[in-house]
Each structure stands twice: as structure tokens, then as C-alpha cells.
Image (cartoon, rainbow, N blue to C red):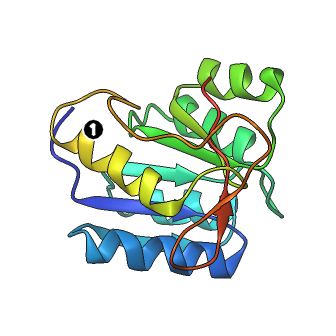
């Protein structure tokens, strides 16, 4: 995968989108947030991104529909899913639609997502040597006080 420079954040929860945008920018990435799948499709029609971070539960167009539409249009932009949907079926469906990784937001520190993106950008694979939170129902907080939980696909 080529070096990642620009990232589209598709997230309807504005505080999470903003925190992720700031973390990514502080790590040297260009990050642009949009609030739903329809907005994402519009911007993807005029601008190229190296990576998409995609929530699944959003108004107007959900993440599964957006992911299917991206692939239907022949776009090969890598997609990392961040969602609170934690069922194995949801993870399998996202992966089948082409997601390269899947993070449970309530279980994953933002720094883990950013570190994963750095590893991928440096030529590694998704989740290669990325610290993960415990699988027990414990929660970790990052500096922005947003709680995420990590689960493997």
C-alpha cells in the first residue's frame, strides 16, 4: 500500500470526528471529516483520499451502503471501519465489502487507530504490532476522554 497522506473521516458523531481529525493531523496526516455517507460520496466524486475511516451507523446513508457503493464505483481506497456494532456478522459483512480493519469504538483508544494507520502507511499490514485493549469489558480512556474497545475481525 502506498504511503498514506490524506484521510477521509466519515463519522456522524462530531466530537469523535473532531478528536480523530486532530489526532491524525498531529501525526502528520491530512484529515477531512464528513458527517454521513451521502457527504462522503459527494467528496469522493471530486477528491482522492489514501484512506477512509468509516462509521457504520449514520443518518442518510449507513456505512455498509457507502462501502458497497464505493466498491461498485470501482474505487479501491482502503477503508478502516470504526463502529459500536460488535457482532461477528457485522465485522464479516464489512470485511466482505472490502474493509481492511474493524475497530469497536467503545473499546479502542484513538491513539491505537492512529498507530495502526501509521503502521499501514509505513508498509505494514493492518493491526501489525498495534496494542489492543483487553477483551474483558474494561475500558481505557485516551487523552480526549473518548472510550474505544478493540476486537479483532
State whether residue 80 is above or below residue 76. below
- Residue at 67 percent across and 80 percent down: it is 14
How many discs mark residues in the rendered view? 1
Confirm whether residue 45 shows in the render: no
Confirm whether residue 137 shows in the render: yes
Asked whether 47 or 82 is in front, the reply is: 82
Asked whether 134 or 6 is in front, the reply is: 134
Q: Is residue 69 left or right of residue 131?
A: right
- Residue at 30 percent across and 75 percent down: it is 25
What percent of the width, then of the height, locates residue 150? 62, 41
Q: Is residue 26 left or right of residue 18?
A: left
* Quarter of the picture holding the N terminus: top left
What percent of the width, then of the height, locates residue 40? 57, 61
State whether residue 80 is above or below residue 35. above
State whether residue 94 is above or below residue 25. above
- Residue at 72 percent across and 70 percent down: it is 12
Q: Secondary structure at mark 1?
A: helix
What percent of the width, then of the height, locates residue 84? 78, 49
Asked whether 53 or 59 is in front, the reply is: 53
- Residue at 73 percent across and 48 percent down: it is 56
Crowd band around label 1 with a 10 angstrom C-alpha radius: few (<14), some (14–19), many (20+): some
What percent of the width, then of the height, locates residue 103? 60, 42
* Quarter of the picture holding the C terminus: top right
Q: Is residue 126 left or right of residue 120?
A: right
Check disc 1 and report the residue beneath it.
120
Amino acid at each position: 500500500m502506498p504511503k498514506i497522506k490524506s484521510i477521509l473521516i466519515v463519522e456522524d458523531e462530531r466530537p469523535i470526528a473532531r478528536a480523530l481529525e486532530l489526532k491524525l493531523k498531529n501525526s502528520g496526516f491530512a484529515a477531512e471529516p464528513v458527517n454521513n455517507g451521502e457527504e462522503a460520496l459527494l467528496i469522493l466524486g471530486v477528491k482522492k483520499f489514501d484512506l477512509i475511516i468509516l462509521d457504520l451507523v449514520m443518518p442518510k446513508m449507513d456505512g455498509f451502503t457507502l462501502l458497497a457503493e464505493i466498491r461498485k464505483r470501482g474505487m479501491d481506497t482502503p477503508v478502516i471501519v470504526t463502529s459500536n456494532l460488535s457482532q461477528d456478522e457485522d465485522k464479516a459483512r464489512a470485511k466482505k465489502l472490502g474493509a481492511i480493519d474493524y475497530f469497536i469504538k467503545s473499546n479502542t483508544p484513538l491513539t491505537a487507530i492512529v498507530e495502526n494507520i501509521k503502521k499501514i502507511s509505513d508498509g505494514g499490514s493492518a493491526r501489525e504490532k498495534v496494542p489492543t485493549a483487553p477483551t474483558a469489558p474494561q475500558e481505557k480512556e485516551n487523552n480526549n476522554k473518548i472510550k474505544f474497545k478493540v476486537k479483532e475481525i
